[in-house]
Image: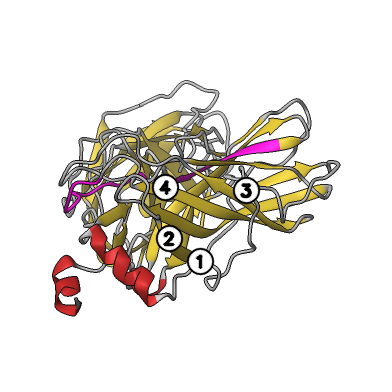
Amino acid sequence: MVALLLGGAGIAITASPAQAAETKFNVKCVPPAGGGSPVEGETTAKVTAPASAKVGDEVDVSWETVKPASNNTDLMDIPQDAVQPTGWITVSGGGGELKVVGEKKNPPIPKKAPMQMSVMKGKLKLTKAGKITLTPGKYDVAVTFSFGTFVTKCAPTGAVGVGATIDVSAGSSGGTTTGGTTTGGTTTGGTTTGGTTTGGTTTGGTTSGGSTTGGGGGQTDFPGKAVEVAFDCGPVVPGGIKTPVTINAKKNGGSYDLTVKTAKGAMAAPMALPAGALKPSMDVKLGGADSGTVKVSGPANADPIPDKAPVSLSDMTGTYKPGKSGKVTLSPDQLTIDVTMAPGSTPINVPCKATSSGVSLELDTTAQPGGSGSSTASGSSTSGGGLAETGAEDEGGIKALALVAGTVILLGGAVFTFTPWRRLRGTR
């Protein structure tokens, strides 16, 4: 996620017709966690700026990506108006970098199709006479889905040619040309529950500033950030699961009502699933001042899921009553899915232990009487996690799970794959 560009205080002046030049250079693009391996490729950038101007002018500069370095992944389609690019142009003569930002505007981009990005624009204040060169460099591509915003970071791997040159004539002031005319700004969104990014920065391929601190000042809503979580589901799901998870909180007296969202990805179900077939729950791990876990659970699917129709997990809710005062972190932990194929039948329990996770939310809490993170739950108490208590190692449970007849559930880029029906027939 990137900052919206705020223009400088002055009015942009183009002292001569704009000139545009294309330059090709190699880049390495590193996707966010769970988005695949780094990709190296060649990109073509067209930088546009006035051919000449004078000291004191503030000129428009733009960067158009004529040819992207890579295509969309094969994980999911990118929706319309979901891609927002940010680039940094090196200004010669000690001018630093000029930050240019594009609009969040693009057509739908299918899997494996070339990426399409809007033109990035910025304003450059000229404070020194002479020839000023503009050279494109690193850039970020933020893509927003319903479940979160994810940033791919690209940087040149070799020399980059000059994109444009401005001949700056003497004016009323001297000094050094600088690209520091782009200021903060914010882009809201990032998750369906209002995750925010401040300052327009990104770190490590994931959004920064997504967690919210502070429980005072009258604030009641505390949006978390989407974190990539890897789950180990044992032999039931070979290879495990990777999906973004977001934890959001709403202050309710001295407690917090939690809502946990997973990726709302979808794929064609291989068979029809009845209403009430899938019911998710999760342990939210507490850290910092408090410890233990909070159980959240979601309702089962209200409607039948037709064959080849999209499949998703419902949002999970629960209540956290702080047992300690201070800064408390909330991280996704074990995910459990109960599968019920017929009314009244015993649910098949599918436990998935989080092998890697991250902090989605930070709260500044005040201890409440009777509060305890390790026992707070939504209608039930937590067991502290662990696969041994869930029956996941039970061979009969795994075989019973096969009766789901090869159900496949896609969570964004993550896939649950249950035992195929034809394999079951061979063992019966």
Q: What is the CA distance from the residue labelled 1 to the residue labelled 2?
A: 7 Å
Q: Quadrant of the C terminus?
A: bottom left
Q: Amino acid at mark 4?
A: Lys
Sequence-earlier tag: 4 or 2: 4
The range drawn in magenta is: 256-273
Q: Which residue occupies 52% across, 45% down?
A: 297
Q: Amino acid at mark 1?
A: Thr
Secondary structure under badge 1?
A: loop
Q: Which residue occupies 19% across, 67% down?
A: 420
Question: Does residue 55 show up?
Answer: yes
Any magenta on residue 267?
yes
Q: Are marks 1 and 2 in contact (CB under 8 Å)?
A: yes
- Residue 24, percent across and down? 23, 58
Reading the image, the residue beneath label 4 is 279
Residue 390 image label: 1
Reading the image, the residue beneath label 3 is 380
